Image (cartoon, rainbow, N blue to C red):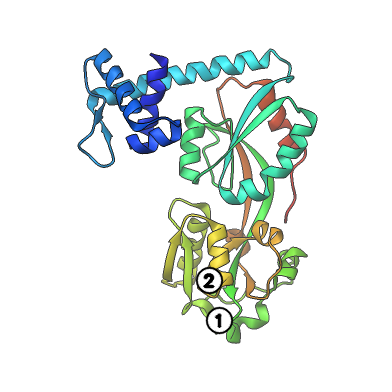
Amino acid sequence: MFHEMRYVYAVYQEQSFSKAAEKLYISQPSLSAMVKRAEKRIGSDIFNRSTIPVTLTQIGEAYIADVEKIMELETELRRHVSDSNDLLIGHLSVGGTTLFTSFILPALIAGFTKRYPGVTIQICEASTQRLEKELAEGTLDFLIDNCELSTKIYNQEIVCAEELLLAVPAASAAHQTAGRFSLNASDIQKGRHLLKDTEIAPFDAFQNENFLLLKEGNNTRARADKIFKRARIKPKILFLLDQQMTTYHLACNNVGCAFVSDTLVKHMPATKEILFYKLDHDLAKRYIYLYSRQNNYQTRAVKAFIEMAAKAPLSFS
């Protein structure tokens, strides 16, 4: 029965029998047969197969809700068992967007695994929205992100600070007006943008530029919207993208302007194809946080990871 539940849940997550079968490494006919068996056992269809993507029936919604309760209980049991092993063995699951799993997590994980080599760590890369959902459901132990989550629901530890910058292709005509305020990659890597005497360019110098923005629901996008509103500019949006690294590479290839963090710039090879501009400090400065669920049993591995993040914050700005 529990095996069937996991198969049904995979179809629910992927909203597709074919994608779920691929994820589970089984054939689609085998998966369909397993789901049919579960539906026969409860006496009702779980999925509406006539829709694309497949959706849950009313009974299916109740079934999935109960499966999630069972999975959460199983997760809690696993955490209690691993706690008794005094960190000789254990498991952690950490989620983040590509930017943070590429540049922030490696240093944290390296320090932790050196001290606790018996603890396995699973890294999940996805959008902030999906990762927050998985953190809320208990699938993830931690989420590392610059988003602002409710501290009534989640524990919050500051990992490091970062500064948002405007990245403008070197070939842009805007440099004719704002060029004296520009900074190159070497300036950012040396922290020149953080100095008080580094001036901020008037943002209206970029009002005729094409912009590469992240999709709504992202901290960088929310700050960009506020910057446009403050400057009374309606941006010409060329692309809406999922990842900051994508906007950066497009800007380097003279496609448009992008809002990027100094965390990213400091970890990328210096290039002459792009110049940077300092932004208003109250909208540019932000923190990268490590989130975990409150009111949730914490294994010794989880507690140790939180303690390490809190005592040894990284500094990129």
Rendered location of residue 134, percent (x, y): 48, 34
Q: Which mark is residue 172?
A: 1
Would you call the spot at circle 2 few (<14 residues within 10 Å), some (14-19), or many (20 or more)? many
User: Could you say whether the residue bearing mark 2 is in a helix, strand or loop?
Assistant: strand
Q: Residue at horizontal 59%, vertical 19%? A: 297
Q: Is residue 142 above or below residue 97?
A: above
Which residue in the structure is indicated by mark 2? 257
Query: Of the residues shown, which amino acid type is indicated by label 1?
Result: Ser
Asked whether the residues under the numbered discs 1 and 2 touch, taking CB atoms below 8 Å apart as contact, a structural biologist would say: yes
Quarter assignment of residue 42: top left
Q: Is residue 63 left or right of residue 263?
A: left
**Image height of 25 relative to 210, above or below:** above
Is the N terminus in the top left, top right, bottom left or bottom right quadrant? Answer: top left
Q: Residue at x 65, y 21 (%)?
A: 299
Rendered residue at 55%/31% (across/down): 140
Q: Nearer the viewer, residue 243 or 15?
A: 15
Circle nearer the N terminus (1, 2): 1
Q: Residues within 10 Å of mark 1 (few under 14, many from 20)?
A: some
Give the amino acid at mark 2. Answer: Cys
